[in-house]
Image (tube, rainbow, N blue to C red):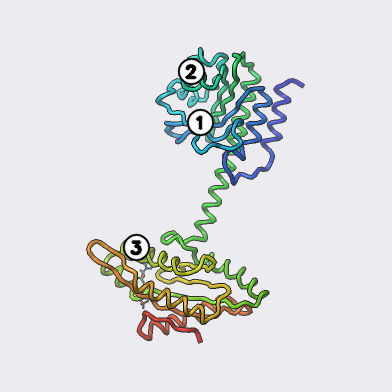
Amino acid sequence: MNRLTQSTQKLRRISSQEVDVSGEHQSFLHDIIFEAKSLLQVDRVSVWLFDDMHQPTKLLNYANTDWLDVPAQLPVLSIDDFPVYFATIITGQSIAADNASLDPRTSEFTDIYLKPNDIATMLDTAIFKNGIALGVVCCEGRTDVRQWQEWEVAITEMVADCCSRRLLVHELYQMQQKLTKMAFQDMLTGLNNRRFLMEHAKREMSRHQRTERPMSLIMMDLDRFKRINDDFGHDAGDKVLQKFAQCCLDVVRVEDCFCRLGGEEFVVLLPETSVSDAHMVASRLCSATRDMEVRQENALIRVTASFGVSEVNPSMPFSHALKMADQAVYRAKANGRDQIQLAC
Ligand SMILES: Nc1nc2c(ncn2[C@@H]2O[C@H](COP(=O)(O)OP(=O)(O)OP(=O)(O)O)[C@@H](O)[C@H]2O)c(=O)[nH]1
């Protein structure tokens, strides 16, 4: 079997493997760049990505066989300093520079990179995404110049394709993470949303059923919020909601689950908390809201909120506790607002 066939088989096996793409590039490109180093018998293989694939101005170093611990400050190559190299790579041509200091496509690197790092020969090729160069795989030999063979260029191009596939999987993973976050997060306040609360409550209720520890719920609704929108505008209303969210987060504990149900309605689920303790938390939230000020142009906006506190009985559906707390909020509103009512 010739070298090309052997190397192709190795790379195909590597690129078919499932890998954890949740970490840094150095971790999930590690096996590919190490295999490239071994197949091509070079001193170093590195992966660089463009800052912007559509209008690249810089190449950023992302993964390197030499650095198992990636330094905080990675080298950056700018298009202004290496115009010929960039122009060649962007068009998708591989650069097999036998003598890197003499080859016009890589000689730009001589003083700044080749000499200080003792690099004599380079074989670089573009990593593509949708037919556009996204970055570069860079293979470097130290000390001796070398005559690159066609099969070695083909292998480097295949390494770049393996990287491209891994990067795509990494991008899909990041997109999925973002979508999951969006599905469970309120975009305006950054708080968890109703969907998150329902999922979280299910888990908490099962835990509390086993431990028989108390759990409580506080529902809160800003008072006469419509007036704020009407008097100061919708943006001011949004600002109030954001400030209120932050203000409440400062009061509750990290293990409490604070969510925006929608509009000007919020809930905090308090594990390991009796109704009387939840009432104390609600009192703190009530006075923190009263003390809160939001500046809008020359005006200072102040708000109050009405609170309903209920026990969460793990043997009843969670919607029951929500309903009880909601009814208590309704009574607080009917009773003059800016107060707390216990569910009965
Ligand atoms: N700025 C802003 N306003 C919102 C948002 N979501 C809901 N609202 C507004 O919140 C207001 C809620 O008004 P109402 O349900 O009448 O309640 P309220 O004025 O707070 O009166 P009470 O609850 O009875 O004290 C409505 O005007 C909604 O348009 C939001 O994300 N941003």
| 3D distance between C-alphas at marks 3 and 1 | 42 Å
| Mark 1–mark 2 CB contact (< 8 Å) | no
Question: At 60% across and 20% down in the image, what residue appears?
Answer: 141
**Mark 2 or 3: the one toward you:** 2
Q: Sequence order check: which comes first, mark 1 or mark 2? A: 2
Q: Is mark 1 within 8 Å of ligand 1?
A: no
Image region (quadrant) for ligand 1:
bottom left
Q: Tell me if residue 282 comes above or below residue 128 in the rendering.
A: below
State left or right for residue 281 relative to residue 23. left
Mark 1 surroundings: few (<14), some (14-19) or many (≥20) residues within 10 A: many
Amino acid at the residue labelled 1: Ala
Q: Which residue is mark 3?
A: 239
Secondary element type, mark 3: helix
State left or right for residue 233 relative to residue 277. left
| 3D distance between C-alphas at marks 2 and 3 | 55 Å
Q: Which residue is mark 1?
A: 133
Can you tell which mark lies on residue 110?
2
Question: At 51% across and 12% down in the image, what residue appears?
Answer: 102
